[in-house]
Amino acid sequence: MQVRPQGLYYVPADAYIDPHDAVGRAIITHGHADHARDGHGEVFATPETLEIMRTRYYLKDETQETGLAYGTRHDLGNGVTLWFASAGHILGSAQAVLEYNGTRIVAAGDYKRHPDPTCTPFEVVPCDVFITEATFALPVFQHPPLEAEVEKLLRSLRALPHRTHIVGVYALGKCQRLMKTLRLAGYEEPFYMHGALKRLTELYEGYGQDFGAWELVSEIPRADKHVFQGKIVLCPPAQINDRWSRRFADPLPTVASGWMQIRARARQKRAEMALVVSDHADWGDLIRTCEETGADNIWITHGRVEALQYALEQRGMKAKALNLIGRDESVE
Ligand SMILES: [Zn+2]
């Protein structure tokens, strides 16, 4: 494994994992924009990830696609076998498992251990080398159960029925997970949605997810401001305070993100309510996962790399920083 300008390169298979530039052969762990880029000659991913990439125009006609369902082994040539294990991050998200010469390397991509009704749970794969992210690798990050954050939103809706609750969510994963969790908590009103969230929500529905009734804000006549009062409007985070949000009566800007545990970030987004909703492993889960893989070597790709490296070394694990650039939850 090498760190090249294009990203993580696996020499025996002549393949990159989540490269940030166009390459000949790419293994893609999931569809978020900081992992899935366009212009590759050959792409290996789960069928769900391929469909997400197609929806976002990351695949060209000439791209050679190989879709591998979780657990399906594929011969990459030169004695290398590739298979995907679920990562619990978003729909279709996967850890890339590479086997060569009796050594198993697992590149986890982004992952989380908290339950998520919109994707397959994380699978621990015993391995020799575990390549992990470190997005939320500081002891301060202990993500609360999503049910508690959703309850906070539902309480606010009951207490402030005259206000339009405008919730900023990333279009891929966060939006659908929040809707599903609200439904499971008994919320029955229709969701109102910014157009940017439509296609990916429909894609999830195509995989059997049921979000109940939702409508596009753009399909409601402008004069009907009262329709949204006491309801949930979902939009990309940048829209909670911009011109778009002025059409709503008495808006209550809310952001749902893993970063919302940091008050300064919530203030910076000018959010009146902050919901801690993360699609990444928190501090405890990062360490636990590294331990559970039983890997002799842990390589850390991006995020709070030094903090995680230090904590793993304190626990007797061999850890090193790969210092990959160009990855951030906020890129999405
Ligand atoms: Zn991601």
Image: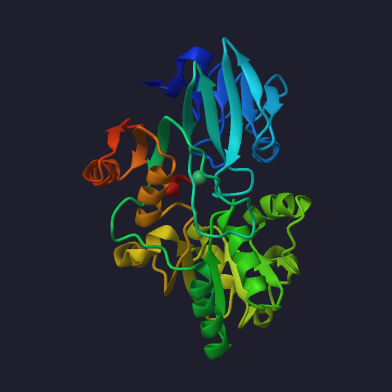
Q: Is residue 76 visible?
A: yes
Q: Nearer the viewer, residue 304 or 52?
A: 304
Measuring from the top left, give residue 79's x and y in whole percent. 57, 12
Horizontal arrangement in the rendering, residue 301 relative to residue 87 (left or right): left
Q: Is residue 199 above or below residue 114?
A: above
Q: Residue at x 50, y 22 (%)?
A: 16
Q: Quadrant of residue 211?
A: bottom right
Residue 311, horizontal then vertical, whole percent:
25, 47
Q: Does residue 270 sit above or below 120 in this rendering?
A: below
Coloration of the structure image:
rainbow
The front one of 58 and 194 is: 58
268 horizontally vs 247: left or right:
left
Instruction: Give the image quarter of residue 32.
Output: top right
User: Along the line of sight, which residue is nearer the eye, 128 or 302?
Assistant: 128
The residue that appears at 38% across and 45% down in the rendered structure is: 291
List the single residue furthest toward the bottom: 159
Q: Quadrant of the N terminus?
A: top left
Counting the numbered discs, the total is 0
Q: Is residue 36 visible?
A: no
Going 39% across and 68% down the picture, which residue do you hit?
A: 270
Question: Where, by quadrant of the figure, is residue 166 drawn?
Answer: bottom right
